[in-house]
Image: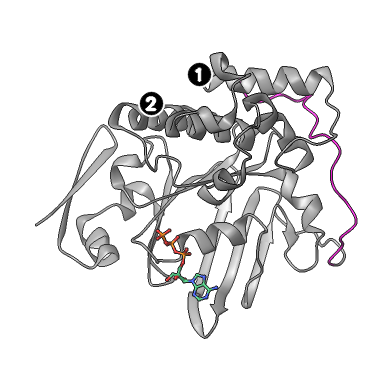
Amino acid sequence: MTYRDPQAGAGPQASGVTEGTIERAADPDTVVRMDRVGVRRSGTELLADLDWTVELDERWVVLGPNGAGKTTLLRLAAAEMHPTTGTVELLGERLGRVDVFDLRPRIGLASANLAGRVPSDEPVLDVVRSAGYGVLGTWRERYEDEDDRRALGLIEIMGVSALARRAYGTLSTGERQRVLLARALMTDPELLLLDEPAAGLDLGAREDLVELLSELAADPDGPATVMVTHHVEEIPPNCSHVMLMRDGRVVAQGLLDDVMTSENLSATFGQPLELSSRRRRFTAVRR
Ligand SMILES: Nc1ncnc2c1ncn2[C@@H]1O[C@H](COP(=O)(O)OP(=O)(O)OP(=O)(O)O)[C@@H](O)[C@H]1O
C-alpha cells in the first residue's frame, strides 16, 4: 500500500488557541500513554483507572459492548476531550499542556460523529482534501496540486476513484466509510483512530474493509492504529493488540493472541461465549 507520502503537506493548520506549553515525553515511539485515567460526566464514571500504552508499530482493536467507554477512550486519544483524573500523553505531548490544534493534524480520525457532520452536498474530493485544514465543508480553502494528487491517490487506494466528483450524501454506507478512511489518512498521521469503521456494512463490504484495514495494519511504515468495534468478526487479522472493555474499565489488554480467549470475551460481554478463530479471523457464539 502506498498511502505514505513524505512530500504530503498537511495544509495550513489552524492556530490561535493555546492551552499551554509543549512538553516532550521521553520515548518517541510511544504514541499514546494513559496513566490512571478517569473520565466522569454528570456523576457517571465513563472511564476509570485506565492505563494504556500504544507504540508506533502497534495496531490495536478496542472491543466491548455498548456503553463500555470505547468512544470516550477514542475521543481522549483524538485530543477531543480531557481526562477528569490521570494523565494522557499523545505523540509525546501532554494533554492540557499542548495546543490541541497542533496535535490534531497528526492524528487521523474516522468516526460516526464525523460522518454525521459531513455536508451531504460536499464532493468526495473535498471531503478528503479538506482534512489538511482540519475542516469539514469547503469554504475558501486553496489547495495545492500536491494536495489534490495526494487526495486522489488515497481515493484510488480506497477503491472509490469513480466517486471522486460525487456528492458525499449520494454514497452508500460502505462508500462513505472508504472516503472517511481516505480523509483520515490525508495528513499522513502518526496515529489513526477508527470508531466502528465496519458499522452498517453488508457482508461483502465488511470483508473488503477488513482486508483493507489488515493491509494497512501490516505496513511497517503505517501509522499506529486503534480501531473500535463491537464485533470479533471485524478484527483485521494483522492487528497486534486488543483491549477488552466493560463498564468503563479494562477487562484485559495486550497481545491479540494472549487476550482473545473465550474466558476474556465472556467477561467482557457478561455472558458465556465460545470464541473460535481461523486464519486469525474470529467468530463468537453463546455457549
Ligand atoms: N456526557 C455524559 N454524561 C453522562 N453519561 C455519559 C455522557 N457521555 C457518555 N456517557 C455514558 O458513558 C458511557 C460510555 O459511553 P461511550 O460512548 O464511550 O461507550 P461506547 O463503548 O462507545 O458505546 P457504544 O458501543 O454504544 O457506542 C455510556 O453509558 C454513555 O451513556
Camera-side residue: 25 or 239? 239
**Residue 37 in sight from this viewpoint:** yes
Q: Where residue 68 sits in the image (x, y, percent)?
A: 40, 66
Tag 2 near tag 1, CB within 8 Å: yes
Provide the secondary structure element on which disc 2 rests: helix
Q: Nearer the viewer, residue 152 or 234?
A: 152
Numbered circle sitting on residue 74: none
Which percent across, then down, holds residue 9?
81, 30
Among the two numbered marks 2 and 1 on one chain, the one whose residue lies closer to the N terminus: 1
Taking the image as shown, residue 244 lies to the left or right of residue 120, namely left
Expressed as whole percent of the image width and height from the top left, the position of residue 6 reads: 75, 25
Q: Which span of residues is magenta-colored? A: 1-19
Q: In the current view of this chain or complex, which residue is farthest to the left?
A: 287
Query: In this rendering, is residue 44 above or below 279?
Result: below
The Cα–Cα distance between marks 2 and 1, rounded to whole angstroms, is: 10 Å
* Outermost residue toward the top in this view: 162
Query: Looking at the image, is 255 positioned above or below residue 4?
Result: below
Q: State the mark number for residue 208.
A: 2
Q: Main secondary structure of the magenta part?
A: loop
Tally of numbered discs: 2
Q: Which residue is mark 1?
A: 159
Residue 161 location, quadrant: top right
